[in-house]
Structures are given as C-alpha cells and as structure tokens.
Image: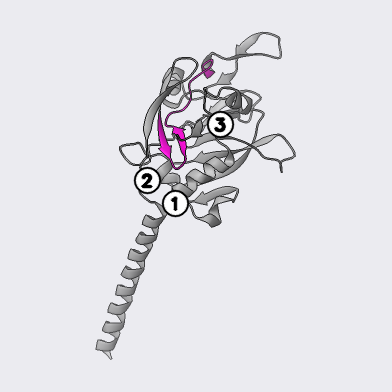
C-alpha cells in the first residue's frame, strides 16, 4: 500500500510539472517573436527626427511626437484673467527631462492636427492589427478594458524585438482639482487613436493604455476634453 501511495504521489508531481511546462508553452505562443520588416527615420514640422519600424502593413513611429509648444511652456487664462501655466507637474520637477524622455502631450484635437506629412494618427483598427501581429487572440481584440496579450511586445526596442518602444509617460488630466496635473508617470503609457467612441454620451475617443510587468493592453474610452496624451503616428508601408 505504501508503494502504491508513493507511485500515486510521484505521478501527481509529474502531472503538475507537465501542466507547468504546458502553461509556459502557452505563454510563448501569446508572445511571438516579432521583428520589424523595415526601419527608417522621419522628420516632423519642427525638425525633430524619429525612428520608425514596419510592423505588418504599417510603418509606426518608434518614438513619441515632440512637435508643437512643449507642454511645460503652455499657458491658459486663469479665472482671474491672467495667464498661468496650464499644467501642474506634481512630484515631477524636471519637466525638460520628462519631455525628452516621453515627448510632448496632446489633446485629441491636437493629435489629429499635428500629423507629419504622409502620416496619420492610428485608428482603433490600426491598433487592433498591431495587437494581432503581436499575438493577441481574436476573442480579446474587440473588448473594452484590459485585454490579455501584446503588452510585452509593445515596449520592446529594435534590439529586443518589435522596436515599437512605447513608453510609460503617464498623461495630463484633471486630478481631484480644477488644475491639470501630470499623473501616472512610469506607471502607465497613454496613446490616442483617431477613432471616436460613438457610444459615449460625451465626446470621447478610443485610446490604448499599457502598464509595466503585465502582458496586457487596455482598450479604453477616454473623454477628449481635459486629457493630454502621448502620440504615435502611422502610414501605409511602401
């Protein structure tokens, strides 16, 4: 009887190990190796130069746009009639480092208007095509909210893999006060799409959100008023 119990225990351990190996295999399938088909550089209207990578049928900017007035130099009229900074940086005291690391921050309207020649703000379908390229399953693609897959490949450099190199730059938005504050730096990356959310009662657009250490990408409906996010542009690959 003791020998039989030992055999059962041994077989149970083997089954658990096999399940673990199978699970690792599934994770590998969810994270295919993706390398850019082509690479190059492009220049915006202000003379800033960026890398781009071809992923699937699109060229994607591999760095966040910097064009326009830097966010930390923007001013708005206060309720007293004077001009004051639009944004409060909160705990961030080195705004130029923030700008150089994460690029500029744009409203939805600004993101649409600042497209470099020959480029466009990616649509929700463009982001979905990229997520499919990065191994996200069909059952996840159309969901709103956090969806499994593709997140790890979104942040890879060209040396690591995909080359898309999305960054965790946070966003500018209203945070518990009437002032616009910078929030979630290093915790989340927020990126506009060109697609409006026609199901929202208020004006909103579909955005993408990434966060560290999770192989997930959020497909989110974000109000177009009161939010400034980072921007990437795409074009049809030649």
Whether tag 1 and tag 2 are in contact, CB under 8 A, the answer is: yes
The outermost residue toward the left is: 3
- Whether residue 213 is visible here, answered yes or no, is no
Q: How many residues crowd around disc 1 within 10 Å: few (fewer than 14), some, or many (20 or more)? A: many
Q: Position of residue 93 (x, y in %)?
A: 45, 20
- Distance from Cα at disc 1 to Cα at disc 2: 9 Å
Residue 133 relative to residue 142: left or right: left
The image's colour scheme reads one colour
Circle nearer the N terminus (3, 2): 2
At a point 53% along the width and 19% down the height, the residue shown is 71
Residue with the mark numbered 2: 34
In the image, the segment drawn in magenta is 52-71
Q: How many residues crowd around disc 2 within 10 Å: few (fewer than 14), some, or many (20 or more)? A: some
At mark 1, the secondary structure is loop
Say if 2 sits above or below 73 in the image.
Answer: below
At mark 2, the secondary structure is loop
Whether tag 3 and tag 1 are in contact, CB under 8 A, the answer is: no
Q: Nearer the viewer, residue 86 or 51?
A: 51
Residue with the mark numbered 3: 121
Q: Position of residue 7 (x, y in %)?
A: 27, 83
Residue 56 relative to residue 20: left or right: right
- Distance from Cα at disc 3 to Cα at disc 2: 22 Å
Q: Is residue 34 magenta?
A: no
Q: Position of residue 125 (x, y in %)?
A: 57, 43
Q: Nearer the viewer, residue 171 or 25?
A: 25
The outermost residue toward the right is: 201
Residue with the mark numbered 1: 135
The quadrant where residue 85 appears: top right
Q: Position of residue 89 (x, y in %)?
A: 52, 22
- Distance from Cα at disc 3 to Cα at disc 1: 22 Å
At a point 34% along the width and 36% down the height, the residue shown is 158
């Amino acid at each position: 009887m003791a020998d039989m119990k030992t055999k059962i225990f041994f077989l149970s351990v083997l089954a658990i190990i096999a399940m673990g190996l199978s699970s690792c295999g599934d994770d590998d399938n969810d994270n295919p190796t993706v390398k850019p088909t082509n690479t190059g550089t492009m220049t915006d209207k202000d003379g800033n130069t960026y890398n781009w990578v071809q992923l699937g049928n699109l060229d994607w900017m591999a760095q966040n746009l910097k064009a326009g007035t830097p966010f930390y130099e923007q001013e708005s009229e206060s309720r007293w009639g004077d001009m004051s900074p639009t944004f409060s940086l909160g705990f961030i005291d080195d705004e130029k480092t923030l700008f150089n690391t994460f690029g500029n921050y744009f409203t939805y309207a600004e993101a649409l208007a600042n497209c470099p020649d020959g480029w466009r703000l990616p649509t929700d379908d463009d982001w979905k095509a990229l997520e499919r390229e990065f191994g996200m399953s069909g059952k996840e693609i159309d969901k709103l909210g956090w969806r499994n897959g593709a997140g790890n490949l979104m942040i890879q450099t060209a040396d690591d893999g995909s080359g898309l190199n999305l960054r965790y730059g946070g966003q500018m938005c209203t945070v518990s006060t009437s002032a616009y504050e910078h929030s979630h730096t290093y915790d989340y990356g927020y990126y506009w799409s060109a697609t409006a959310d026609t199901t929202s009662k208020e004006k909103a657009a579909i955005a993408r959100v990434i966060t560290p250490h999770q192989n997930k990408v959020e497909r989110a409906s974000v109000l177009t008023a009161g939010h400034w996010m980072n921007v990437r542009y795409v074009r049809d690959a030649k």
